[in-house]
Amino acid sequence: MRIYKVGGAVRDRLLGKPVTDIDWVVVGATTEEMLAKGFRPVGADFPVFLHPKSGEEYALARTERKSGRGYGGFTFHASPEVTLEEDLIRRDLTINAMAEDDQQNLTDPYHGQRDLEARLLRHVSPAFAEDPLRVLRVARFAARYAALGFTVAPETLELMRQLSASGELEALTPERSWKEISRALMEDQPQVFIEVLRACDALKVLMPEVDALFGVPQPPAHHPEIDTGVHTLSVLQQAAMHKQSLTVRWACLLHDLGKGLTPEEEWPQHIAHEFKGLKLIKAVNERFKAPRDCQELALLVGEYHTHGHRALELKPSTLLELLQSFDVYRRPQRFEEFIAACEMDARGRKGLEERSYPQADYLRGAATAARSVAVQPLLEKGFKGPELGEAIKRERLKALKAYKEAASA
Ligand code: ATP
Ligand code: MG
């Protein structure tokens, strides 16, 4: 049997990037031979094994044929006769379809190295169109390598467009889509992921709520960039520049969905967009089965981001309601993430990227003030049950009044 490094490890070494996980392909071996060498099978009908020591993935060289819709709609053929070239041609991009032996001899039948130099994300063969996940993968690689100057080859973008129009994207499972979306959002230029999806018409299939924001104007006084879609991408870009968590990035992407529902007569105002957007945020959350913390924060940021911006003008009672909605007493981290998302929203505006955001510290201070109310003295005074709850609230309100007065003094 012959063993080669493939995929990302080869690509990233040639790009001079750090290689984290290595994928291997094994040519000329049978399942029995792999098992005899101590490899552990990954799935029942999938010719992939884990190395007994390193735990890295070793896949038998295989060919694939599409036999139906969706991910299950593939038949694999793995046998010792399948060649390295046959295995490489089923891969998505030419830069991902190179292999390397232990002497670093490159096998590159589809000119991945040429495309690396040309900074092009190009499909290997027309079979690209057999797996709609590749639309998301290419957009993700575009986000990852944008800083190096990579773009999607026009003919690949055309194939992605055909895939988007074919209805195949709808067959993706939420789990597979979310894996790509979440990884793409964590790249350095996540806005490129959304731009590429939009350029191939996949965005209006996957997230029509986000797609609808493009072409929707906002008041230039607050939003010099005007367009809501452009603003959303800038917010996402700010979130990446500030190394925000996935949760914050997801909330940034969805925070303004309500603006897509504003009747044109009301443009560029968006009255109550925070509230109107909630059902859209919920729909996107559920479509991709986003993790609970992502879902929760997106909804909270959607509803309250304007409160964040107006923090310094909020009445103590409104401030208290805000803190209660976030359950800031038990979930301090979530409130920090809310503040981060608001700040990214404020900076994701043309020419305002470097502005200061005094609301952030003001909100932190308010949370500290409300949290500093001690329950013990109230218990000692004999408060119980709902009355205790009311007493705590009164004390917190008092603390917030004092805080606001001190801050404006
Ligand atoms: P990363 O750095 O994100 O791990 P990678 O290129 O190694 O990038 P993997 O998902 O680990 O990506 O997949 C390893 C290789 O398997 C890819 O380089 C590609 O050749 C191939 N591959 C993975 N998923 C697909 C797919 N859906 N369609 C075609 N080829 C794929
Ligand atoms: Mg990999």
Image (cartoon, grey):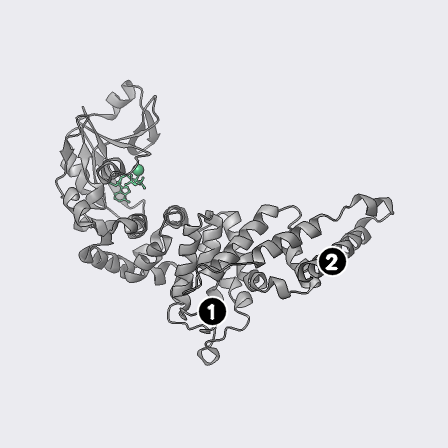
How dense is the environment of label 1, judged by Cα within 10 Å: few (below 14), some, or many (20 and up)?
A: many
Point 80% across, 51% down: residue: 388
Kindly state the secondary structure of the residue where label 1 is placed: helix
Looking at the image, residue 9 sits to the left or right of residue 298; the answer is left
Q: Is residue 83 visible?
A: no
Q: Quadrant of residue 161?
A: bottom left
Q: Quadrant of residue 61?
A: top left
- Give the residue at mark 2: 402
Q: Is residue 238 above or below residue 116?
A: below
Q: Is residue 154 above or below residue 62?
A: below
CA gap, disc 1 and disc 2: 36 Å
How dense is the environment of label 2, judged by Cα within 10 Å: few (below 14), some, or many (20 and up)?
A: some
Looking at the image, in which quadrant does ligand 2 appear? top left
Q: Is residue 181 above or below residue 202?
A: above
Q: Is residue 406 above or below residue 187?
A: below
Looking at the image, residue 122 sits to the left or right of residue 390; the answer is left
Q: Is residue 50 visible?
A: yes
Which amino acid type corresponds to the residue marked 1 in the rendered image?
Lys
Residue 127 versus residue 199: which sits nearer the camera? 199
- Give the residue at mark 1: 259
Q: Give x and y (percent) for residue 275.
A: 56, 66
Which amino acid type corresponds to the residue marked 2 in the rendered image?
Ala
Q: Give x and y (percent) for residue 86.
A: 15, 38
Kindly state the secondary structure of the residue where label 2 is placed: helix
Q: Are marks 1 and 2 in contact (CB under 8 Å)?
A: no
Q: Give x and y (percent) for residue 278.
A: 53, 62
Q: In which quadrant is the N terminus drawn?
A: top left
